[in-house]
């Protein structure tokens, strides 16, 4: 019996699954992060290869799909493909698996997210976690990507954007050049700071990551639930931002089914109204789908899709 292996890697963890021929998950594993921009190429490659190694047993391998955060440019793809190719050949020598005869797909993690919606390389997906990116397939089969520009010039509506706006509101409340907000005291307490100005040392430490800023989203949800108008407005703006991203994608793909994947699902109740109203301006009949697979299963299903990039041995 043959298996497909799926690898879904990001900035905090890497999830690996092995599927049987019916698509049933036989094994599910977790390794540390594999976004090479955050952990370095050597560590990212090691975590992926160890995950694939641990997913192997006696079965033959029919395909491997790897979808990773941080694979955004052709250079990103080539760097990762070259490193994975070498390590897979080494792993093959140790395990007896001939990876040269196995299709190995490598793409950005939004591709695995797309496949997780219905297990098909079609439709649209909005992947919103720390950042935000949308991907879809138009009627001619062309792949359309919108967003994913990173936190400096994009990612509106993602977790980092929400967390950053919360910190802005915190400072504005403290200095009184903006409205008072519960975020001033709540973020201070959440981060274990004695006073608001200590946020400068916390924020500008060299090791500080986007995910740590995005981790403030539950604080914003908490203060919004307590009636804080600024927190509510931040979440409304997030819904609008993701709605505009979705509208841009739908104009290009001309299809009206959308899967929503990622941590944004945890705050959907707070952003749904502004998201729907924004999208409905142009696409009132949009159908929102709940994904039926995990992104790691979606990654495994990528392995036999001809339209995605495969590592050539």
Image (cartoon, rainbow, N blue to C red):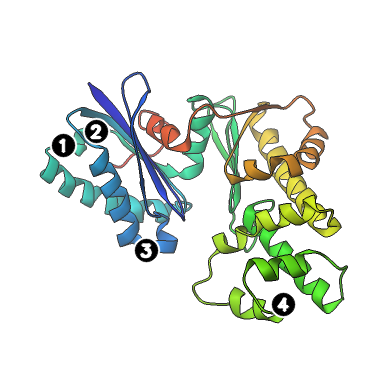
Q: Quadrant of the C terminus?
A: top left
| Residue 287 coordinates in the image, percent (x, y) | 69, 25
Contact, CB < 8 Å: mark 2 with mark 1? yes
> What is the secondary structure assignment of the residue under circle 4?
helix
Q: Is residue 243 above or below residue 172?
A: above
Above or below residue 95? Residue 137 is above
Between circles 4 and 2, the one closer to the viewer is 4
At horizontal 44% and vertical 62% (from top left) the residue drawn is 38
Within 10 Å of disc 1 (Cα), the crowding (few <14, some 14-19, many 20+) is some
Seen from the viewer's position, the closer of residues 3 and 66 is 3
Give the CA distance from mark 3 to mark 4: 33 Å
Foreground label between 3 and 2: 3
In front: mark 2 or mark 1?
1
Q: Any mark on residue 102, and which?
A: 2
Other-residue count near label 3 (Cα within 10 Å), few / some / many at <14 / 14–19 / ≥20: few
Circle nearer the N terminus (3, 4): 3
Mark earlier in primary sequence (1, 4): 1
Q: Which residue is mark 4?
A: 196
**What x and y, as percent, mark residue 307?**
43, 32
Left or right of residue 65, residue 293 in this image: right
State which tag comes first along the sequence, 3 or 2: 3
Please give left or right for residue 287 compared with residue 234 in the image.
Answer: left
Residue 153 or 219: which is nearer the viewer? Answer: 219
Q: Which residue is mark 1?
A: 97
**Does 41 appear above or below 89?**
below
Neighbourhood count class around disc 2 (C-alpha, 10 Å): few under 14, some 14–19, many 20 upward: some
Q: CA distance from mark 2 to mark 1?
A: 9 Å
Report x, y in % for residue 293: 49, 29
What secondary structure is marked by label 1?
loop
Distance, label 3 to label 2, CA atoms, is 26 Å
10 Å neighbourhood of mark 4: few (<14), some, or many (≥20)?
A: some
Residue at image mark 3? 40
């Amino acid at each position: 019996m043959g298996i497909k292996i799926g690898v879904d890697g990001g900035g905090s963890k890497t999830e690996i699954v092995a599927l049987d021929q019916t698509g049933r998950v036989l094994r599910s594993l977790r390794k540390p992060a594999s976004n090479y921009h955050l952990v370095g190429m050597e560590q990212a490659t090691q975590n992926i290869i160890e995950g694939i190694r641990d997913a192997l047993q006696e079965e033959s391998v029919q395909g491997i799909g790897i979808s990773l955060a941080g694979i955004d440019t052709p250079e990103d793809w080539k760097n990762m493909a070259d490193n994975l190719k070498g390590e897979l050949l080494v792993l093959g020598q140790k395990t007896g698996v001939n990876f040269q005869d196995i299709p190995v797909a490598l793409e950005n993690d939004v591709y695995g997210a797309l496949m997780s919606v219905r297990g098909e390389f079609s439709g649209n997906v909005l992947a919103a976690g720390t950042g935000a990116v949308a991907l879809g397939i138009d009627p001619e089969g062309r792949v359309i990507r919108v967003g994913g520009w990173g936190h400096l010039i994009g990612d509106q509506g993602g977790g980092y954007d929400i967390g950053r706006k919360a910190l802005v509101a915190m400072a504005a409340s403290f200095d009184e050049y903006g409205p008072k907000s519960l975020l001033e005291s709540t973020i201070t307490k959440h981060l274990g700071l004695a006073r608001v100005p200590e946020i400068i040392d916390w924020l500008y430490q060299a090791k500080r990551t986007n995910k740590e800023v995005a981790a403030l989203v539950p604080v914003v949800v908490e203060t919004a639930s307590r009636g804080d108008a600024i927190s509510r407005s931040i979440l409304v703006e997030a819904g609008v931002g993701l709605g505009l991203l979705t509208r841009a994608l739908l104009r290009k793909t001309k299809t009206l089914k959308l899967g929503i994947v990622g941590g944004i699902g945890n705050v959907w109740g707070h952003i749904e109204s502004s998201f729907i109203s924004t999208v409905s301006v142009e696409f009132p009949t949009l159908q929102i789908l709940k994904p039926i697979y995990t992104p790691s299963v979606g990654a495994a299903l990528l392995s036999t899709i001809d339209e995605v990039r495969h590592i050539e041995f």
